[in-house]
Image (spheres, grey):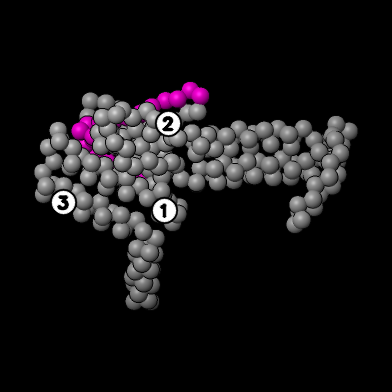
């Protein structure tokens, strides 16, 4: 059972529970692989100069075949790769984002647990950042602008606008939060508009239109 689900009080109801996007372990693995290959490359390059300090090894990766000597350089770069991979992996396995009918909760850590939370009535605005890879893979980071307390920043999650929309619905239904119906409708329309713009199909269509405009401008200038 998730930590957030166990931590909420009996007076509140859990509406949404999500975890960071799988881009985190993938990014960590890419960094690990990059450092590993750099170490193997340096081993192969310096083999003739450092052979007396090296250890025999045999590596067969089907496509890549190496045999000869391995130096401490490879071990060092492998350790660097592990250290680069670990924070991304820990973010993925230890983080939870929960939305209840009263607050937003962000939990991090496995042993030393840290909780960042904000009540729904303290949220003043939300900002979603994607980046090119984010809109292509469908993830984004959310920053909640809060009053009286520090802003709450969430890690990259899948379909971030779904969480933003759910938080507005929760605020609208909250008995102690004054949320005008017209204001609520305008906010939902804006969220759905940004959500639609963030879809890969919409982005590709926009890029195609920009390319056509640039092409016809260049053709006319000629």
Estimate the spatial distance between the alpha carbons at disc 3 and disc 2, rounded to whole Å. Answer: 33 Å
In the depicted structure, whether residue 31 falls above or below residue 11:
below
The residue furthest front is 10
Residue 185: numbered disc: 3
| Residue at mark 2 to residue at mark 1: CA–CA distance | 25 Å
Q: Secondary structure at mark 2?
A: helix
In the drawing, does residue 135 fall left or right of residue 45?
Answer: left
* Disc 2 to disc 1: CB gap under 8 Å: no
Q: Residue at x 12, y 37 (%)?
A: 178
Location of residue 95 in the rendering, given as x and y in whole percent from the top left corner: 45, 35
On screen, residue 208 above or below 172: below
33 left or right of 218 in image: right
Q: Does 135 appear above or below 116?
A: below
Q: Quadrant of the N terminus?
A: top left
The one nearer the camera, 98 or 205, is: 98
Stretch in magenta: 111-129
Q: Position of residue 125 (x, y in %)?
A: 24, 39
Label 1 belongs to which residue? 138
Looking at the image, tell me whether mark 3 or mark 2 is earlier in sequence order: 2
Q: Nearer the viewer, residue 170 or 182?
A: 170
Q: Which residue is mark 2?
A: 3
Dot 3, how many residues are within 10 Å of its Cα: few (below 14), some (14-19), or many (20+)? few
Query: Closer to us: mark 1 or mark 3?
Result: 3
């Amino acid at each position: 059972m998730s930590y957030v689900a166990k931590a909420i009080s009996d007076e509140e109801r859990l509406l949404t529970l999500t975890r960071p996007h799988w881009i985190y372990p993938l990014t960590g693995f890419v960094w690990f692989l990059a450092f590993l290959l750099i170490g193997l490359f340096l081993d192969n390059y310096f083999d003739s100069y450092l052979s007396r300090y090296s250890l025999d090894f045999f590596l067969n990766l089907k496509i890549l075949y190496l045999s000869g000597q391995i130096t401490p350089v490879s071990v060092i770069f492998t350790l660097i790769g592990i250290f680069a991979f670990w924070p991304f992996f820990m973010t993925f396995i230890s983080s939870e984002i929960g939305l209840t009918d009263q607050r937003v909760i962000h939990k991090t850590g496995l042993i030393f647990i840290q909780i960042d939370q904000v009540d729904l009535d303290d949220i003043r605005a939300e900002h979603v950042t994607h980046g090119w890879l984010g809109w292509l893979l469908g993830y984004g980071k959310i920053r909640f602008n809060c009053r009286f307390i520090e802003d709450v920043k969430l890690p990259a999650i899948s379909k971030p606008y779904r969480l933003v929309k759910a938080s507005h619905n929760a605020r609208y239904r909250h008995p102690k939060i004054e949320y005008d119906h017209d204001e609520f409708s305008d906010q939902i329309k804006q969220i759905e508009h940004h959500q639609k713009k963030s879809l890969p199909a919409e982005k590709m269509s926009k890029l195609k239109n920009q390319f056509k405009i640039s092409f016809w401008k260049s053709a006319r200038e000629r």
